[in-house]
Image (cartoon, rainbow, N blue to C red):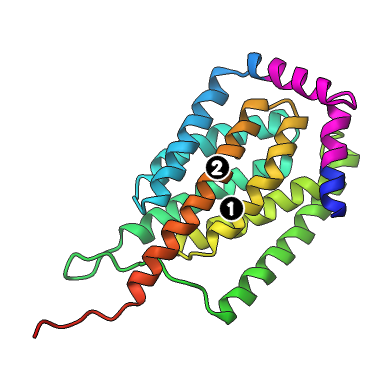
Amino acid sequence: MEIWQSINSLVLTAAGGSTHGLWAQFVAGMQQTSLLEYVAVVAGVVSVWYSRKENILVYPIGLISTIIYVYLSFKYHLIGEASVNVYYSILSVYGWVLWARKNKQHEHVLHITFSDRRQWGQQLLFFGVLYVIIYTCLHYLKGAFYEGVIPWADGFASATAYTGMWLMARKKVESWYWWIATNIASIPLYFVKGLVFSSVFYFILLVMAFAGLVEWKRRARLQQEPVSEPA
């Protein structure tokens, strides 16, 4: 509850303390959106659509979006998000290799699966350690170089995104839970930085993440069903 109150306060403060100011900032931000940001958003949406369909094109198209966002994140002092997009780019190559791997029968080796209890523990530990590290680094950067950094919000969005990308490369259903958390945190974060179109982008991704979760759950259950041999 306190996190939501902090987010609401953050957004309203950036908008001049009123819903009218919020709308005015939204309209102004959309008008000032650069062509580069439009390209990044469109590529990102297409990439997520392919990930929902378990299509390997998620990675080459996603790289277009992540590389542009590395530049935009540094420009607008979203240092944690910049690190995330560098990580996305690296993990995209890693995931591309894993998703493309086939056995001698030319069948894909990696399939969508659920995480077991041990893997859930690893995910939570991975997230927790990353959040502490990213928050600490951002807190230092805020005082030394980037006054516009918001350590707790940027750190949370970044740590959840790191976890989601790692799990997606391994085709784990739970990756979508982490993407949902990332998108919820990123909507206000990008809005207060003036990247309004990107804020809309993360809202679209939030909706797509719920759809992706449903689709991957369905596919994982199909993988679990025993194949009946012909009589």
- Residue 211 in view of the camera: yes
- Residue 145 in view of the camera: no
Asked if disc 1 and disc 2 are in contact, CB closer than 8 Å, the reply is yes
Looking at the magenta stretch, what is its main secondary structure? helix
Type of amino acid under label 1: Trp
Q: Position of residue 30 (x, y in %)?
A: 64, 19
Q: Secondary structure at mark 1?
A: helix
Q: Give the answer, above or below, for where 230 lies relative to 178.
A: below
Part of the protein shown in magenta: 8-29
Q: Secondary structure at mark 2?
A: helix
Residue at image coords 53%, 50%: 209
- Crowdedness near tag 1: few (<14), some (14–19) or many (≥20) residues, C-alpha within 10 Å: many
What residue is disc 1 on? Answer: 179
Q: Give the answer, above or below, for where 9 lies relative to 197.
A: below
Residue at image coords 39%, 71%: 221
Q: Position of residue 120 (x, y in %)?
A: 60, 74
What residue is disc 2 on? Answer: 205
Residue 163 occupies quadrant: bottom right
Is 219 on the left-hand or right-hand side of 21?
Answer: left
- Front-most of residues 67 and 166: 166
Residue 82 occupies quadrant: top right
Q: Position of residue 222 (x, y in %)?
A: 33, 70
Q: Total number of numbered labels?
A: 2
- Front-most of residues 74 and 37: 37
The quarter of the image holding the C terminus is bottom left
Q: Is residue 14 magenta?
A: yes
Residue at image coords 68%, 27%: 195
- Crowdedness near tag 2: few (<14), some (14–19) or many (≥20) residues, C-alpha within 10 Å: many
Is 154 on the left-hand or right-hand side of 52?
Answer: right
Q: Position of residue 159 (x, y in %)?
A: 68, 55
Q: Is residue 231 magenta?
A: no
